[in-house]
Image: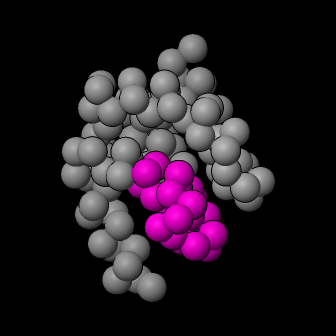
Amino acid sequence: KKQAERQLNEASKISGHPLLVLRLVASSDAADAAVRQSAAVHFKNIVKKGWNPDSEHSDHSIVISPSDRNLIKSHLVELMCTVPPQIQAQCSESISLIAAVDL
């Protein structure tokens, strides 16, 4: 488990990683519910640590590009409406974190 967490932390530093994670959350065919739920939690943590670089929770190694931010903001609410309730909760929290910084 620790090795997987380290690998996810390293991957979160790569440009485009948040979008790849969201694709996994959205893919009802490619992943089972537990994988999608884990991906949603990982995405929420990326947002929490990387969206606001001035936050006390910020991890400055996580950089979310402006284009990724725009894509995330334009698709996250729609995604939330199409996923199971457990995943909706994670998406909702991500939206709240984003809104607290950008609105």
Quadrant that contains the N terminus: bottom left
Residue at the image position 29 percent from the left and 26 percent from the top = 67
On screen, residue 88 versus residue 48, left or right, reads right
Can residue 59 be seen at all in this image of the molecule?
A: no
Q: Left or right: where does residue 83 sit relative to residue 73? A: right
Which picture quadrant has residue 82? top right
Q: Magenta stretch: residue 37 in it?
A: yes
Give the percent coordinates (x, y) of residue 18. 38, 47
Residue extending farthest top? 103
Residue drawn at x 27%, y 45% as measured from the top left:
16
* Up/down of 1 relative to 5, above or below: below
Q: Position of residue 68 (x, y in %)?
A: 33, 33
Looking at the image, can residue 72 be seen? yes
What predominant SS class does the magenta segment belong to? helix
Using the image as rendered, state which of residue 76 and residue 50 is in the foreground. 76
- Which span of residues is magenta-colored? 21-42
Q: Residue at x 22, y 45 (%)?
A: 15
Would you say residue 84 sits in the magenta stretch? no
